[in-house]
Amino acid sequence: PAASSSPIQRTVTSLDSITISQDIDLAEGRARVDQRVKIYADSAYLRLSAAASITPEASTKRIDFTFDLAYFQLGGLRVPYPVPFRLLGKEAMGWLDTTYLSDRLRVSRGNKGTTFVLARPGVRDA
């Protein structure tokens, strides 16, 4: 059976007080996928970061990633996120397929079946 998003993930992402942002930087030498899960304010968040790449033989819209960094930021204090990504092996890996992209909106489907709808802040429909 296919994997699915965790019940904790579904619960956290459904809370009104949670804001999730995602940055994708595919520049050569520093390709990353970063997620920030903010709780009320910018000074308290969870950062999940992954090394990223595009597989040329796959779709040009697929980004492969491997989580390798995570921490809680509480004001000026950084607390490590207690997940041993190296020990997780393939469980720390995944991919995102972009199914729709505009200046304002990106819709992606992840390897665990989750659909992500992300709006770029400050950009309005034409």
Image (cartoon, grey):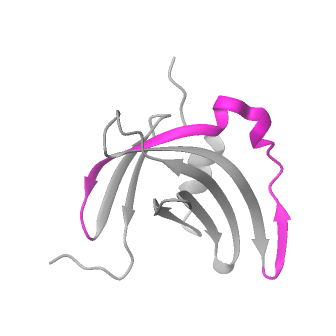
Camera-nearest residue between 33 and 35: 33
Q: Which residues make up the magenta segment?
A: 75-103
Q: Quick check: 12 left or right of 123?
A: right
Q: Residue furthest left?
A: 126
User: Eyeballing the image, is 72 above or below 63?
Assistant: below
> Is 125 displayed left or right of 9 in the figure?
left
| Image-quadrant location for residue 101 | bottom left
* Quadrant in which the C terminus appears: bottom left
- Residue 12 placement (x, y as % from top left): 62, 54
Q: Determine the residue located farthest toward the front in the rendered image.
A: 29
For image coordinates 64% across by 80% down, the residue present is 42
Q: Give how far across and how far down residue 123 sits, in percent.
A: 30, 79
Q: Quick check: 78 left or right of 91?
A: right
- Residue 28 x %, y %: 48, 59
Q: Nearer the viewer, residue 76 or 5?
A: 76
**Residue 6 shows in this picture:** no
Residue 62's quadrant in the figure? top left
Name the one closer to the observer, 66 or 1.
Answer: 66
Residue in the picture at 60% in, 65% down: 36
